Amino acid sequence: MAIVEGQWETIRDELQAYTLRHGGLVPLDRPTVQAAATVAWDGAIKMDADDTSPQLVNGNAEWNILCLRMWGMQHSQARFHFPKTIAILEKALGARLLGMTFSELAAGADIVPHLGDSNGFIRCHLGLEVPEGFPLCGLRVAAESSGWQEGRITGFTDAYLHSAWNHSSRRRRILIFDVARTEHRANTGFMCRWVISGFILHQVELVWPWVTRTAWRERTALTCIRQALRIPLHMGVFHDVVHRWMGATSSRVR
């Protein structure tokens, strides 16, 4: 982790350069004038106003995220836009690096308590732009609360109930990255397929509800999806498609 903390300013500067070119953490399928000549990329998260997903942010506040890698699947344009960030994290963590996401929490925003996908990894937050210390700007995991510091990493288990807030007058930006626990290092591929298959099955279920009408059908569908994911995970095939299926195609989470 010392490698990442030692080069945090490089990561921050690369993010700032990206947001200046594109007008923020916005989808590149709606490019600005400056971004028109760049490679199109839809690697950020945005949910439409009529989206039925659970609202994670209070009122009209914004929580913007830009996902580079999720559950071992890296977007094809991630390295094009963030070569230094990816190189730093890969050098420090190698195959244990499961996910990378930039997170921007607007002033006055509260992220409601929610649970993550697995306890098989450690979720790490690297402070990049932290407007205020705790308690104005902070994170609560289970019964413990703390703040962020620029250039410092905070780690926790994502499976615990957690929430965050920014009660300052300026935005807060961090890099979120997921690191497989040492005891699960040999099974990271299986763990990634396990989580991704659940997301994909949910999408399939929306189209063909009969797929999950019985426990046997659901187990069979999950097994088939996990086996099919062996090719994408090992060879990099369909990573962008999986990003879109898992909802990482725009820039605002509500």
Image (cartoon, helix red, strand yellow):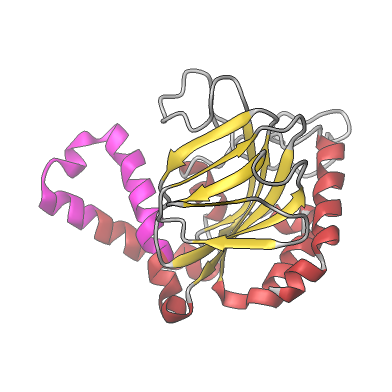
From what the image shows, is residue 96 above or below residue 175?
below
The secondary structure that dominates the magenta segment is: helix
User: The magenta stretch spans which residues?
Assistant: 192-221
Q: Name the residue located 22 percent from the left edge and 35 percent from the top edge.
A: 209
Residue 30 occupies quadrant: top right
Q: Name the residue located 53 percent from the left edge and 30 percent from the top edge.
A: 57
Query: How far across and how far down the image is residue 6, in percent?
Result: 81, 70
Closer to us: 156 or 74: 156
Specify whether 247 is left or right of 60: left
Residue 36 occupies quadrant: top right
From what the image shows, is residue 5 above or below residue 125?
below
Specify whether 46 is left or right of 232: right
Task: Say whether residue 2 is visible.
Answer: yes
Closer to us: 39 or 219: 219
Specify whether 34 is left or right of 158: right
Query: How far across and how far down the image is residue 235, in percent?
Result: 53, 69
Query: How far across and how far down the image is residue 47, in percent?
Result: 54, 28
Is 218 colored magenta in this rendering?
yes
